[in-house]
Image (cartoon, coloured by chain):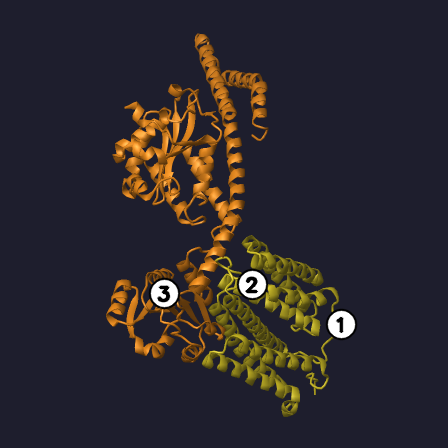
Amino acid sequence: MSLLWLRLAVILYGVAALAVLPAALYHRPRWRHVALPAALAGAFFHFVSITETLVAAHRALPVDTHETLSWFGLLLVIAFLVLATRYRTVSFGIFLLPVAVLFTIVPAFRPGRESLSYSLVGTGWLLLLHIALLLTAYAALFLSLIASLLYLIQERRLKQKRAEPQRGWLPPLETLDQIGLNALRFGLPCMTAGLLIGSGLALQTIGLAFFADPKVLLSFAMWVAYVLMIFIRTHSGLRGRRAVYLSSFVFLGVLAVWAANSLSAVHRFKAP
Amino acid sequence: MGGEFAVGGAQVQGAMSERRVGSNAKVELLLLGVNHTTAPINVRERLAIPTERLGDATKMLAEQPGVREALILSTCNRVELLTVQDGMGADGDGSAVGGAPTLSMLRFLNEYLRVQVTDIQPHVYEFRESEAVRHLFRVASSLDSMVVGESQILGQVKQSWTVGRDVGAVKSTLDPLLQRAFSVAKRVRTETQIGKSTVSVASVAAELARKIFGSLTGKTVLLVGAGKMSDLTARHLIQQGTQTLLVANRTEARAQAIADALRTPSITTGVIPLAQLYEQAHRADIVITSTGAGHVFTPENARQVLQRRKNRPVFFIDIAVPRDVDPAVNDLEGCFVYDIDDLQQVAMQNKAVRNHEAEAAETIVSSEVARYREQMSRAPSREAIKQLMLDAEALRLQEMARIVQQLSREPLSEEQIAAVDRLTKSLTGKLLHPQIAALREDLGGSD
């Protein structure tokens, strides 16, 4: 049954991703009324699917890459809905919704069969929090990257001096800058808390050897990069192209950490 | 006196169709007016009716002989009288130019505004029936405005409608017509892009500022030099929410005078000595230059401004000729430079977009006029059905009363009266059914 809800969510995300194009790019605001309800309904069914899966499996965690990506997709859709409500813009949907579809379509139609190699008894909710917080931080970083890219596009359009309707498809430059920076500021505490919880759990189950793992060290390096990025953006007013480079660099680093944690067997929280 | 009211130059366009409302009286929609295309300002200003006198004027117009309902629209670009005329006997079908209804309305203008009819008659246009409906829809949708697509006119039509209703001059015919005009205007605005772009240089500049900064609340504008256009642009920006205005000019007294002129309780103004321009320019988010002294802002000093602003964007609006801002400043990340040609070009492109959208809007108006006419053409059948049923019911009740009276010596019980009542109702219904069915067929079966 949970797969049915997930498939329904994918279809709704697909509808939203398509509807957002005329709404944002062809100045047809009526399509917002399709895109937003579709995305909202999709997020609802997605949440139902995740809950059903976890309850049925008597666990509180995503156990494989597909499930994790599906969670990430849900977070991106939530970010899109928050931005659409707060800033009255659906432009972010052009990028966020297709990524959400991509991340959800695989688990919906080819669910994985991986299982956890460690016991969750006692640490279940903490581990859940660890994963949820880190995924939220990644989503915030991704959002910040998209905001920086949109900033570049809007900047170029303004410099090219092209006429366009009163409210173009992109939010004002300053709004985009705020979205990018606020996303990072929101993501930092999530990443910090996620790492701290993860470290605490690892200390309990693995001990100090955990901190000798290069991937773990890379995770902390990424946290430092995240902090530096916010510091630079806040204090030097870094915007435009350089902000995109910086966000891209940190995002690629985070992707590398995540890929290393997911794919490498060295660090898998194996029970002692 | 009668000859004085002839409207020799009036325009009469479109079909002169008629319709009946209620009883047998002929009713015609008649619109008379002048606007920016037919009358110069000196004529329009003599005809303009101030808002505080609108109710009084509308009431007086509605009291003119033959006028059943009335509405007056008076703006800086047009004065229009829309009336529902009744009893057109004097002119036959009332379609002749300068007929009694037209004369009556011109007489009203003459009496109310003390304007000689001969002075205004060459500028007056006249529309009747469906053409009057079309004109009203076009006006409400801002297709007949000086700046096509501007949004003010709809509010002005709504104000006239409210006033007309308050004084009892807008009733069963004009009220639904006006409401339809509002929905047509709304449809035009939502289904086309007609009002989505700005078309004056000052408003284009303000709109661009909004694209850079979003809300302009709390933003600072720096005026470098003085000029009409820069003053107008600054005022536009103030309207959009800018709260701080700095002025730099060669003569400080002139700068102070400009600052004083633009200062209001909600606007803070200040004067910057021209010698300190580069030290102070970083305080401004928007710089409007109009000195014409050549490159006041070069890439070097613009870069310094940016550094002091911690790379926060700065918008240069260069209205001067020769230009005050080196075009190369636009290449700096965070600097946006628009000169007068750029602004005019954007305004022209926006105008072209509006004109293109106006074509789509005209199609909407045409379809809505056709729909309105179709609905109105059904009105007589609807009225006839209603009248037939009322007449039949009156007859039935009369006959019932007569029977009850005849049997007063041996009165019927309540049950018997109820049975006779049911019987007569049923008979009346069955007898009327074929006629009502035929009339409903006239309505296209929709009712």
Q: Quadrant of the C terminus of chain B?
A: top right
From the viewer's perspective, is the residue at label 2 or at label 1 nearer?
2
Left or right: residue B354 compared with residue A7: left
* Crowdedness near tag 1: few (<14), some (14–19) or many (≥20) residues, C-alpha within 10 Å: few
* Chain of residue at mark 2: A
Give the CA separation, mark 1 to mark 3.
Answer: 59 Å
Left or right: residue A78 compared with residue B1: right
Q: Position of residue A104 (x, y in %)?
A: 68, 66
| Letter of the chain in yellow | A
* Chain of residue at mark 1: A
Front residue of this view, candidates A201 and A182: A182
Give the CA separation, mark 2 to mark 3.
Answer: 27 Å
Q: Is residue B271 visible?
A: yes
Instruction: State the residue position of label 2.
Output: A91
Instruction: State the residue position of label 3.
Output: B242
Tell me where residue B51 sits by quadrant. top left
**Residue A131 sits above or below residue B165 on the image:** below
Instruction: State the residue position of label 1.
Output: A113
Label pair 1/3, CB-CB below 8 angstroms = no
Q: Position of residue B182 (x, y in %)?
A: 45, 42
Front residue of this view, candidates B194 and B165: B194
| Letter of the chain in orange | B
